[in-house]
Structures are given as structure tokens and as C-alpha cells.
Image (cartoon, rainbow, N blue to C red):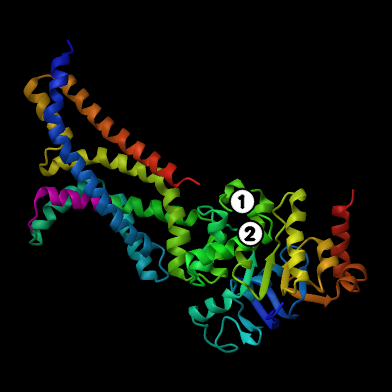
Amino acid sequence: MPGASSVEIRKVNKHHGQFHALKDVDLDILPGKVTCLIGPSGSGKSTLLRCINFLDEYESGEIRIDGQLIGYQSPGGARMPGRTLREIRRSIGMVFQQFNLWPHMTALGNVTEGLIRVRGLPKTEAERRAREALEKVGLSDKMASHPSRLSGGQQQRVAIARTLAMEPRLMLFDEPTSALDPELVGEVLNVMKTLATEGMTMVVVTHEMGFAAHVADQVAFMEKGELVSVDVPDKILHNPQDSRIKAFLRTYHERNSF
Amino acid sequence: MFSVATFLSSFEPLFWAARFTLLISVLGIALGLVIAALVCAAALSRFAPFRWLAALWVSFLRGVPLLVQLLLFYYLLPVIGIDVPALVAAVVTVGICASAYISEIWRGAIMALPTGQVAAATAIGMAPRDIWTRIILPQAFKLSLPALVNELILLVKASSLVSVVGILELTRASQAQAATTFRPLEVYLAAACIYLLINLFLAALGRYLEHRLAV
């Protein structure tokens, strides 16, 4: 995919009140590759993901997208003006655990909204692109439906189409299948696999170890705000050296065996 | 004996007085909605003094009975050299009082929206103005409709209080009518019917709007 972004994360720190959510986190997100963030709940995976588009504000360290610092004018400096931040966010897609579709708009309306308001496209052009994006996620027949009429899996695919239509160079997924009934997980993962093979840079917070094993180019394991280890999936998931990863995978396997 | 003729003949003079009830309610509500939007914006502002002002506004106007507010306002204005007709004073007082309740209804509706709604809009790079007009307000308005209709109905009934500043609205006119005809039961029953009619209409309007905005 031309123009896929890279992200450099250096010594990033973040507190939620007294809680030290991210501790000196270093990570390289490689262009055109899939990075999965795994780890126990509360380990800081989602916070790290939300810092990449500055939805959560990190306090120190640097996050650079294609070399450009996000959130601050200079490392440790003043906040970036809102306009500049919005321009950077245009090329970063984000998909949420709870879909976060706008319930008062149709599926098509959800997708055209950003094209019209953010990209400034005329309505007809926005609708043409929105139809394309919805077709891509397999929802051509649901364009006029409101989110409340769609299944969870369909809603999440609309959410993916909403970000895809903006032509992002980087996509962030925050536990995209965690709120779905088990039988609906596959349809969302399939769309994500397609994006991965097309060379989209993706960062995926997930508990789907199968997806991490088969689709990720690298897997990062986090615990208690620290990035414990990052490596190819096989090393992390099948030959972990760190005892914390072993313990996490053990509980995972126990929970998923029957 | 209940006199059907008196009951029926009571409607005409009472309809006349009900025009004031409607006028005060409708204008009061309209004014209340406008002020409420400002108060609600102040209450949600990032600038703390605005929030304090909004809190002060709401707590005073909710804490003092409308009847007392009407009298206060009516007697205060001439003291500070403002001479307005009683009707204007009544509409302004009702509007100001309603603004306190309506602003809280809206604040509640806005706060009830899931945070993810704004997060999704922020993430695709929408500007704050668009997030408010396209994402937050349309949803919050729809959420607030049942409470808003409730408030409007309360206000129509509370408008009977403006009789204390000498306005002959529906309740005051019924009292006068009852006193002259010596037929209180027939007259008050007619007044009750008119109030009911107005409020059934408001409730129907609310349901219609809810239906229109339904997804």
C-alpha cells in the first residue's frame, strides 16, 4: 500500500491520576505491517493505542508518525494546535471495541459524515466513496440501515468502512472483536485480514491469539504499563522466555480449553 | 344540581383567558429554551467561572418558588427604574425560571451520551463545532424530549401563578367567573377541561417529535 505510515514510540509515560498507566514504553510500528498488542487487562495496551492518535494524552516521551511528533509542538513542549492535530488524525483510522457508530445516522451516513465534514467532499462524491467502502466490508445491502438494525459484526464492519473511506495510512484497532458474539468474530477478522494483506499499517489490541499468531508481523506483550517484549508472533506465543508472558498464556489456554 | 348549560357557557369567557395562559407559557418556554442553551453551555464550559455562574443560576432559580420569584421580579423592577407591563414581567420570570430546569435537562442528556460517540468523531479529525452540531446535540435533543415535554406541561400549569401580578389568565378568570355565577363546580370543570386540552396537545406534539427523530 503506497504511503503506509510508520510509528516510533519512545520513552512514553502516561498517568491516569495516581495510576502509572505507561512506563517508558518503546515500540516501533513498521510501515505496512501488523503489530498486535497483547497482555492482561489494565496492562496499558488500549492506553498506548489511544496515545498514538493522541485521544489519550501522553505526558513525556515521543510518539512520531512518519517522523512527525503528535500532540506536542516539540518534545516536552507546548501542545500542538487543534487544527494540526486534526490534520494528522485524518490519516489515522480508529476502530473501537464498542463500534461507536452514530445511532442517528444510517450506515451510509456514518461513512459519509467524515468525508463531508472533515475532507470537505461534495455529497455525491462522498456517497460514491462511502458505497465503495461499505461494499468492501460486504455491506452493500445495509447502506440505508441505522446501526440499531445491524448485528454487532455488521456494526463493526460499518465502523471499519467509516475509517477506510477516509483513506488512512495507519489503522488502530482497540479490541475490535471483544464486544461481539463468538459467531460474529470471524466476519470482522476476515475484513482485517484483507486489509493486512493489502499492506495497511495496523496496530491491533486484541485477545484473539489466533489472529495474532496468523496475521501479525510482530506481537508486543504488555504488563502493568510496561512493554515487556516485542518479537515475531512465534517467539512470543509459542516460545516465550519471559515468565510473565508464560503466565498470561497459561491463563489464556486454561480459559479457552474445554 | 349540575347545570350543563352553565358548564358549556363557561367555556367562552374561559377560552378568552386561556389565551393569556397560552401566551405566557409559549413565550416563557421560548425564552426559557434560549436562556437554557446559554446556561447549559456555561455549565459545560472549560472555564470555571462560567460553571460557577451556571451553578448559581440553576440553584437560585430552582430553590426559590416561582410564586416568590414573580413577586420579587414584579416589585424589584420599578425599584431599579424599569417600568414594564405585568405581562412582560410574567413572561420573563417564567422564562428565566424554566431556563434553570431546561438547562439541567439538556446537561443531563449530553452527559448521558456514551463517551465513545465523541471519541469516534475526534478520531477521524472532526472539529469541535461539527462534533457539537452533528454528533452531540442531535442525539442529546432527542434524549431530552420526554423530560422537556414534562417540563412544558408543568409550566403551563404553573402559569396560573402569574395571576398574583394581576394577569387574568385561565385560573384567575375561573375564580372570577365562579364568584359571579355562584356555579364553581361547572366553571372549574370547564377550566380543567381547557388545561387538559392544552396539555394533551403538548404531549401529542412531544410524541410526534420523538417519532420523527426516532431511528
Disc marking residue A134: 2
Is the residue B157 above or below the residue A19 in the image? above
Type of amino acid at the residue the image marks with label 2: Leu
Which residue is depicted at the point 66% across and 59% down? A135
Instruction: Tell whether A43 sits left or right of B160.
Output: right
Disc marking residue A142: 1
Q: Residues within 10 Å of mark 2 (few under 14, many from 20)?
A: many
- Asked which secondary structure carries label 2, the reply is helix
| Residue B181 magenta | no
| Magenta-drawn stretch, dominant element (helix, strand or loop) | helix
In primary-sequence order, the first of circles 2 and 1 is: 2
Type of amino acid at the residue the image marks with label 1: Lys
Residue range of the region highlighted in magenta in the rendering: B83-97
- Asked which secondary structure carries label 1, the reply is helix
Which residue is depicted at the point 62% across and 72% down? A167
Residue A57 visible in this rendered orientation of the protein: yes
Which residue is depicted at the point 86% across and 63% down? A249
Tags 2 and 1 touching, CB below 8 Å: yes
Q: Residue A157: where, in percent of width, then height?
A: 67, 58
Rendering quarter of residue B122: bottom right
Which chain letter matches label 1? A
Which residue is depicted at the point 35% across and 68% down? B50
Of residues A23 and A138, the one nearer the viewer is: A138
Of residues B186 and A219, the one nearer the viewer is: A219
Residue B175 visible in this rendered orientation of the protein: no
Position of the N terminus of chain A by quadrant: bottom right
Instruction: Tell whether A40 sits left or right of B42.
Output: right
Is the residue B104 above or below the residue B208 in the image? below
